[in-house]
């Protein structure tokens, strides 16, 4: 049995009780890993990290109130000595980009064998890079092809795009946004040009496919 100073200390952060129990059962079987606490939301996680100073933080993707990339950025700025790993069931390039951009050390899928998580923790503590070339390329592609288009839209254009996705026509959008019809038509025309699509139907599909709800800033 390792001494307390030889353990890899881990904090679990996930709001799903079953996931928490699964991670705990898995990691408790690793002789060199010690779970020092668990949390269910972002603020609790911040407090525990500050108090417990774990070597590794394991993040679930669907944390209430605080997306993991925001928490990862906070960790990088306030506790860079703690390694942050995300374990997620959501294999979307948008999430991957945000988490890599926030400075997370690794992103693992919940579908991977449990021993992969244990190995990832050990590798991360040794200073190894856990991001695969494929993950990095996917994130870069999403940033190039999608994120920059989204950032080019104004707040009103984003609101209009969200309403297009809902199936609203220009008259209904004008009423919802309290603008005249000509202004709405200008919004739609600008959206089609910036997204490089030819119809509002294609624009709605682009929004649905490429922008997970957690990344849709400036909602209606």
Image (cartoon, rainbow, N blue to C red):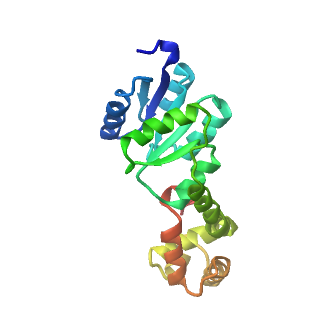
Left or right relative to 64: residue 216:
right
> Who is closer to the viewer here, 129 or 203?
129
* Residue 215 can be seen in this image: no
- Quadrant in the picture for the C terminus: bottom right
- Quadrant in the picture for the N terminus: top left
Name the residue: 35% across, 26% down: 28
Q: Identify the image quadrant of residue 33.
A: top left
> Who is closer to the viewer here, 12 or 169?
12
Name the residue: 64% across, 81% down: 196
Q: Is residue 145 above or below residue 201?
A: above
Find residue 153 and report its horizontal and vertical position in percent.
Answer: 66, 69
Find residue 203 and report its horizontal and vertical position in percent.
Answer: 55, 78
> Who is closer to the viewer here, 176 or 116?
116
Left or right relative to 110: residue 142:
right
Q: Is residue 175 above or below residue 17?
A: below
Find residue 5 and report its horizontal and vertical position in percent.
Answer: 52, 14
Image label count = 0
Find residue 142 and report its horizontal and vertical position in percent.
Answer: 60, 64
> Who is closer to the viewer here, 156 or 165?
165
Q: Residue furthest top?
A: 3
């Amino acid at each position: 049995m390792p001494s307390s100073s030889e353990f890899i200390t881990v904090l679990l952060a996930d709001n799903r009780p079953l996931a928490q129990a699964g991670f705990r059962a898995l990691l408790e079987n690793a002789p060199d890993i010690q779970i020092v606490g668990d949390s269910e939301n972002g603020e609790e996680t911040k407090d525990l990290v500050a108090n417990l100073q774990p070597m590794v933080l394991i993040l679930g993707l669907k944390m209430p109130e605080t997306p993991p990339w925001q928490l990862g950025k906070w960790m990088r700025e306030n506790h860079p000595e703690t390694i942050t790993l995300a374990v997620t069931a959501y294999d979307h390039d948008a999430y991957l980009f945000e988490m890599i951009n926030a400075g997370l050390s690794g992103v693992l899928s919940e579908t991977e064998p449990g021993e992969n998580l244990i190995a990832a923790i050990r590798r991360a503590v040794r200073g190894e890079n856990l991001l695969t070339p494929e993950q990095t390329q996917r994130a870069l592609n999403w940033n190039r092809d999608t994120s920059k288009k989204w950032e080019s839209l104004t707040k009103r254009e984003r609101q209009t795009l969200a309403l297009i996705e809902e199936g609203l026509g220009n008259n209904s959008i004008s009423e919802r946004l309290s603008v005249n019809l000509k202004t709405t038509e200008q919004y739609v025309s600008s959206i089609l040009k910036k997204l490089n699509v030819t119809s509002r139907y294609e624009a709605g599909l682009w929004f649905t496919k490429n922008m997970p709800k957690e990344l849709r800033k400036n909602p209606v």
